[in-house]
Amino acid sequence: MKMKFIFLGHACFQIDTGKEKLLFDPFLTGNGLAEEAASKVECDYIFLSHAHADHFGDAIAIAERTGAKVIAIPEVIGLFPKTVINFQPMNLGGTFTAPFGKVKMVQAIHSCGVAGGIPCGFVLSFNNGLTLYFAGDTALFGDMKLFGKLFDIDYAVLPIGDNYTMGPKDAILAAKFLKTKKVIPVHYNTWPVISQNPEEFKKAAARENVSVVVVKPGESVEL
């Protein structure tokens, strides 16, 4: 069975492996682009790139309701109440082996939203051979070239909104650094300050031989 990428709006998305459901940065309540209510989302794992409200979002409520395992930096995990007990604390450079594959926590260039914490991204190497990189919120940085050497990346989920993260031009350069086969843009159009046209981004990327898959909130694509 092929895996699915389901875009829930802003930087929130799900990966459905057919056996497990992985949820990333679950900002749904208060997200005008969200196509699904936090109370209806089902997941087995919750990945948190950092603790800003537009990424941490509904993490506590969803973790309490579903019992999903939360994967995050220890300082971000420290924000959860005692009612949430299923955690996989990680730090940069570490690898966690899950039933669906391996998760490596990697750096991101941003702020974190919690004292002592740092932002991160994730490289997921699935058992079926597919590799997906979620950059989280980040600027362009040179070590993306290293990721491109260490991993054979099939999909890179990159922010393109600008202002708080890298914008379209830097995202295209990031894709080149990563040597990814395809880019899925996120973190745009939630507010005017991060307004972008994903179709124009796709055209600009194509001129640089970078393949982009635009997924609208509420839509899904097979990986």
Image (spheres, rainbow, N blue to C red):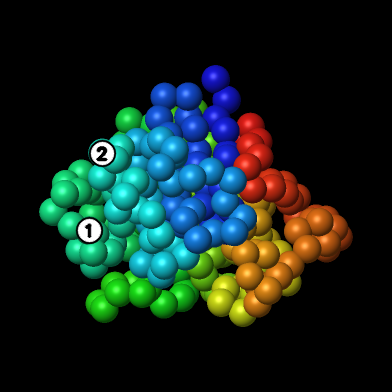
Residue at numbered disc 2:
67
Q: Could you say which disc has been placed on residue 80 in the image?
A: 1
Q: Are marks 1 and 2 in contact (CB under 8 Å)?
A: no
Q: Position of residue 28 (x, y in %)?
A: 49, 53
Q: Residue at x 78, y 63 (%)?
A: 197
Q: Position of residue 182 (x, y in %)?
A: 68, 48
* Up-down relation of residue 223 to residue 123 (above or below): above
Could one spot residue 104 in this view of the protein?
no
* Of the pair 184 and 34, the residue shown nearer to us: 34
Q: Earlier in the sequence, mark 1 or mark 2?
A: 2
Q: Which amino acid does the dot numbered 1 rest on?
A: Phe
Q: Residue at x 18, y 57 (%)?
A: 81
Q: CA distance from mark 1 to mark 2?
A: 13 Å
Q: Quadrant of the C terminus?
A: top right
Q: Quadrant of the N terminus?
A: top right
Q: Position of residue 172 (x, y in %)?
A: 71, 64
Q: Which amino acid does the dot numbered 2 rest on?
A: Gly
Question: Crowding at label 2, few (<14), some or many (≥20) Cα neighbours within 10 Å?
Answer: some
- Say what secondary structure mark 1 lies in: loop
Q: Could you say which disc has been placed on residue 55 in the image?
A: none
Q: Position of residue 178 (x, y in %)?
A: 60, 58
Question: Crowding at label 1, few (<14), some or many (≥20) Cα neighbours within 10 Å?
Answer: some
- Say what secondary structure mark 2 lies in: loop
Q: Quadrant of residue 190?
A: bottom right
Give the side of residue 115 with respect to residue 106, left or right: left
Could one spot residue 110 in this view of the protein?
yes
